[in-house]
Amino acid sequence: MNRRQSFLAAIRGEPLDHAPVTAWCNLATDGVDGAENARRQLAWFVAGGWDICKAMNDYRLAPPAGIDTLHAPGDMLRFTGYALTERPFAQQLDCLRRMRDALPDDVPLLDTLFEPFFSLLFAVGFSQAAFIRAYRHEAAAMLEALTETYLDYIAEIRKVPVDGVMYATNACILPPSSRGINDAEFQLFHAAYDLRLLAAMEGLVRIVHAHGNPLDIRRVLDYPCDVLSWSDRLPGNPSIADMRAITGKCVMGGMDETKLHERSMPQIQAEVADALAQAGGPRKLILAPGCNVNSGISLRHLRCLREAAHGMIQ
């Protein structure tokens, strides 16, 4: 069974000798072009020997010219969407094409996409979340404009082609976290846009990544997706065993991304074994960190994770 077959078998719940394993890392790529971005991400993939190549997307949106942040509700109406020729989209698409050309045919390639609200906060500052939610009509226009851009972008990544998308959302974070939202805010500012974009990804493998903690992951249980990813080791979040009890979907996680770079080799092996035990074996499981790992992680740690996941350590 090659890597793409193993990836798809995990999603379908078919028998596997071992769970596919992957990890990802921010590599300071907003400051480089698509060619250098691809080079860094391919080097990370090769170093880890991963079963799945998840491309990071670190190109950040900028606000319209003349806006440094949101000072008045009308500022949101100036967000009228982005052209795919603009830097964040053009460079990421170039990166993906280069990665696909360089990767073996059997390696599944995943892109990363942040939900519209999440993406816009990168442009105006996360401290502006409450301001945006205070003006729902202007916020809706801004979110709608970016959603339309994202629909165009999804059509383009199909042509690369990518095998799937990790769709990252903050929509499950609960108060009292500074990024927490209530159920009404979830419905107004997240759910409708998430559902439109996930519907547009039909036919690709859709991984919904519930970012942050503490989480109410029930909010996305019924989203149209194939895999659920979250930081299962963080306080306030469900464990893999908890998720096994409430969903039949493939789950992705098992490793504490905040501590992986600090672990001893036996601790990494023990965490892999614990994740497999919670999941009841490798079916419908992709072993991975709950989010991006520390950029200072050693090659020795990466290889240990892969070897433990593949059952190469006795």
Image (cartoon, grey):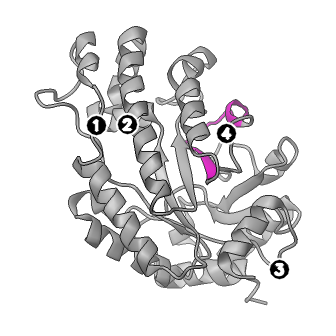
Secondary element under disc 2, as helix, strand or loop, is helix
Q: Which mark is residue 299?
A: none
Q: Earlier in the sequence, mark 4 or mark 3?
A: 3
> How far across and down, in percent of the image, does residue 2 sit?
69, 82
Q: Residue at x 27, y 71 (%)?
A: 35
Q: Residues within 10 Å of mark 1 (few under 14, many from 20)?
A: many
> Label 3, label 1: how many angstroms apart (C-alpha)?
45 Å
Camera-nearest label, 3 or 2: 2
Amino acid type of the residue that numbered disc 2 sits on in the rendered structure:
Thr
> Which residue was labeled with disc 2?
149
Amino acid type of the residue that numbered disc 1 sits on in the rendered structure:
Tyr
Q: Residue at x 70, y 81 (%)?
A: 308
Stretch in magenta:
205-220
> Label 4, label 1: how many angstroms apart (C-alpha)?
36 Å
The image quadrant that residue 259 belongs to is bottom right
> How far across and down, in percent of the image, does residue 199 sit?
61, 38
> Which residue was labeled with disc 4?
236
Comparing 135 with 274, the one in front is: 135
Q: Earlier in the sequence, mark 3 or mark 1?
A: 3
> How far across and down, in percent of the image, does residue 195 sit?
60, 32
> Label 3, label 2: how many angstroms apart (C-alpha)?
41 Å
Camera-nearest label, 3 or 1: 1
Q: Earlier in the sequence, mark 4 or mark 1?
A: 1
Q: How many marks?
A: 4
Whether residue 175 can be seen here? no
> Which residue was labeled with disc 1?
82
Secondary element under disc 1, as helix, strand or loop, is loop
Q: Earlier in the sequence, mark 1 or mark 2?
A: 1
> Which residue was labeled with disc 3?
17
Q: Earlier in the sequence, mark 3 or mark 2?
A: 3
State whether residue 26 is above or below residue 72.
Answer: below
